[in-house]
Image (tube, coloured by chain):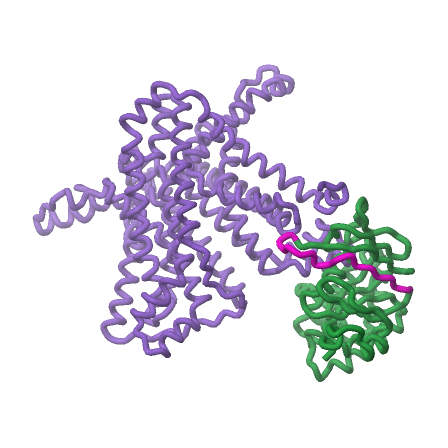
Amino acid sequence: MLRIRDLKFNFNIWSVLSFIFISLIVLPNLNILINILNHPNENWNHIKEYLLKDYIFNSVILVIFTGIFTILIGVSLSWIISVYDFPFRRFFKWGLVLPLAIPPYIAAYTYNGLLNYTGVIQSFLRNNFHIRVNQKYFDVMSAQGAVFIFTMFLFPYVYIITKSFFEKQSASLIENGRVLGRSSLEIFLYVALPISRTAIVGGVSLVILEVLNDYGVVKYFGIPTFSTAIFKTWFAMGDIDSAIRLSASLMFMIFCILTLEKFLRGRKQFSYTTSKVRPISRIELKGSKKILAFTFCFSIFSLGFIIPTLQLIHWSLLTYRKILNTKFLTMISNSLIIALLSSGIIIILAVIIANNCRISKGPLSKIYSKIIVMGYSIPGAVIAIAVIVFFVALDNKLYWLYRMINDTSSKLVLSTSIVMLIFAYVIRFLAIGYNSIESGFEKVGKKFFEASRTLGMNITETFFKVDFKMIRHAILGGFLLVFVDILKELPLTLILRPFNFNTLATKSFEYANDEMIHEAAVSSLIIIIISVILIYFFYKIGDKEAT
Amino acid sequence: MFVEIRGLSFKYKNSKEETLKNFNLNIKKGETVSILGESGSGKSTILRLISGLEIPNSGIIKINNRLIVNDNTFVLPEKREIGMVFQDYALFPHMTVAQNIKFGLKKLSKKEKSKRLKEVLELVSLEKFEERYPYELSGGQQQRVALARALAPKPSLLLLDEPFSNLDATLQSKIRRELKKILNHTGITSIFVTHDKEDSRAIADKVVILKDGKIIQTGCPKNVLDNPLSGYVTEMLG
């Protein structure tokens, strides 16, 4: 029964704004779904007959193998780091997060340049030892190569989530296992792995979503997957209907993965509600085990960070004189401004919606957070189509308005502007900001909010005087994460940017795609340096919060 | 009657049973009423409904002849002029004692704010603590700050949620006496919720015993606590 009184209870500026923002996110995606109902054209039959199988096969192969390898590497590293003490452990603890600072598409062309015939390794072997290697083993531009790249640069997702789970949840269980006389390996297999299943599944599903979102690596390596297929159908064949159909198929696959994730996580939530976190007392490794642990961490760190970074530094030194000019500076400022602007917008939206969901007792708020999380699981290629179709339709509807303002206005105004790109970023990255802020609110709880209300402050006054100050770390943390993600983002930026608008990411990719790998190094390196610094700050904030 | 509650029912979204069933209560001006019950009896819910933090499924609440909630009306919590002391005090950790107390005085001028601050600090005997932060205070001091903060805007009604549950048992009788003194001094109408009959005996003018959202017995503490009507009350009172 709807009563006006209840509306008053739930009706405020926060709930109104949340409703508007969420509707704006849902509309373009609904549009995609409705388009599927149209009759398929001939082109689609061709795609279905000859190509679709390949797309599915390649995507599935990449997802499965990357999933397996990231679990192996991510979980073993998080276990070693949480349970053992060995030289440089403290450094590796956050150093192993750094591969995330290198976008996979940059890693892809860096490793290709490193390993191909003219690359530093083969040249060295050839010139010094007259060794000519079998090219088969050095060809990174293959499905195996893509799995390698995705694994080395996405495993931190599994590592971070599993590690924080080990640190927070398992101290007493692991120590119990030790007291009961089990060996470390047994404890790992029979205690740690089962209880951390939820964390591992959570981490690996992020990896899988990233793999399906990827456009840069598979395009550069020439592996036909859903992402590349959507772009090809759309731009090369000009067939937007089929592109939408492909998008829908991809979304169906993602839907299956998300369902599987839910199923795998199971009902078993092995988590304690106590807020007191007791660190695991770590075992100091000795002798060969010590060296082994160090070597393992160091090898992964080298492959995932040191080697590609050194290679990029080398190339940068070769080319920076040619590259650094005013155009390049414009590009840097483009990148920073759009990342700042979009992250700012995303964080403001995230705060408004998260605050509304926390306060509101209505049924909508639960749906809101589901929709936001869905946004992150939609691959860039699909969002790109949805957003373009939506904005072109919007421009058609608003043409009369443009004419009123400016007689000679062209028909496409919004869809040729930066607004469209920012809009797409919001759909894709809102979840990241939202999660950060939601967990900030959760930590604070509602009691301060309620105390403030009984002291005569309304929701908005309470937010600025009380809540904002208490969640400012969460706001900053969310902002940093979103900023880094937007700085690295490729597919959306590539398609939705206005004409002649270049960012560090798009320029790196264009250079690499034009076989100018050395020239791509400077812009890539800047992305990596900024990301490393911000990731470092993010962890500083986290440490501060913990103490 | 100063506080009039009639036919109040409430159900939390995710629970099947009503937390509160047809609850009625009248309170005279200046009276201190204690709601006594075990955890889960719905006693804190009553305070949340009166303060406007929850909205009842049905029922009427009037304070000083002003209708604050019925089937068609809902006055927002910030407009109710009801003071509340939370179970864990909910002192804003980023504000000093003075800032916490002044928080609810937004309508006053700067001068009036300082004057009122001095008054309530004196009332709870914490004159020297205004620049401290909550974490620099003992549990008993924190409670008095919370009380001072709730009283500062001169609310018409004061609600206290388990005011003694977070304090050392050895301090309880002393703090009960202090609270009783402060309430008497201000002459404020108040409702406090507790699970300890000694709290009720020491402070309340009237006791309401609540079980599963229903009133079982009500009356002056001496009568109720010494002559329990039902087996449950006897058992609960130990």
The quadrant of the image that shows the N terminus of chain A is: top right
Magenta region, residue range: B13-28
A34 falls in the magenta region? no
Residue A397, position in %: x, y? Answer: 58, 21
Residue at the image point whose x is 27% and y is 62% from the top:
A296
The residue sitting at 18% across, 45% down in the picture is: A138
B20 drawn magenta: yes
Q: Residue at x 72, y 77 (%)?
A: B235
Whole-percent x and y of residue B68? 83, 51
Above/below status of B182 relative to A344 = below
Q: Which chain is purple?
A: A
Q: Residue at x 52, y 36 (%)?
A: A422
Residue B160 lies in quadrant: bottom right
Chain B: colour as depicted: green
Residue A196 in sight in this render: yes
Image coordinates for residue A171, horizontal then vertical, percent: 43, 71
